[in-house]
Image (cartoon, rainbow, N blue to C red):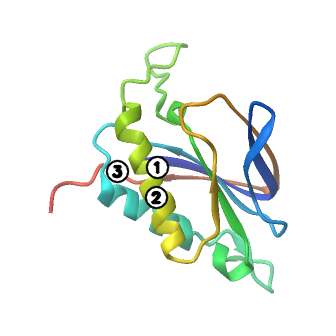
Amino acid sequence: MISLVQRCSRACVRVDGVIVGSLSAKGGLLVLLGIEVGDDARAADKMADKLRKLRIFEDDAGKMNCALAEVGGSMLVVSQFTLAGDCSGGNRPSFVTAARPEIAEPLVTHVVEALRAHGIAVETGRFRTEMKVELENDGPVTIIVRVPVLSSP
């Protein structure tokens, strides 16, 4: 599972010209989330945990030392299968490691629900639609978070 996380002062996602999800007025994190072959509920829980604990907001001393909840921000999660794109073999990406939609959609929902269960305000894009994402990256701060496929317990 892979996510590209951007600290934003504003972000929204539109479907057919209508905003379907956005950050609160306080800003927060835009998370582009890619589900890969082999990902499961355990990986989704681990990703949610990493995202909610990610300390990329500044404290009073100006250090990136605060997590989202500490600054009162929200999160916008947008499914993004193209994060699994592999260009190592040429110039056209291969998406063979991207999970099929019927596997990916419930795992994206799992991540979102796990975040909400910890009190994070989360809005989302709309799965399997053409989305337009607008954002104002704050910093700019952009982090890649990867959770490897976890082996069985």
Give the foreground label among 2 and 3. Answer: 2
Circle 1: residue type: Val
Measure the C-alpha gap from mark 1 to mark 3.
16 Å
Circle 3: residue type: Pro
Give the image quarter of residue 8. bottom right
- Helix, strand or loop under label 2: helix
Q: Are marks 2 and 3 in contact (CB under 8 Å)?
A: no
Query: How many numbered discs?
Result: 3
Q: Residue at x 80, y 85 (%)?
A: 61
Q: Which mark is residue 111?
A: 2
Q: Are marks 2 and 1 in contact (CB under 8 Å)?
A: yes
Measure the C-alpha gap from mark 2 to mark 3.
15 Å
Give the image quarter of residue 55. bottom right
**Residue 103: horizontal and vertical position, in percent?**
34, 39
Q: Which mark is residue 108?
A: 1
Q: Quadrant of the C terminus?
A: bottom left
For label 3, the crowd category at 10 Å Cα-Cα, with few meaning under 14, some 14 to 19 and many 20 or more, is some
- Write down the residue under mark 3: 148
Q: Residue at x 40, y 49 (%)?
A: 107
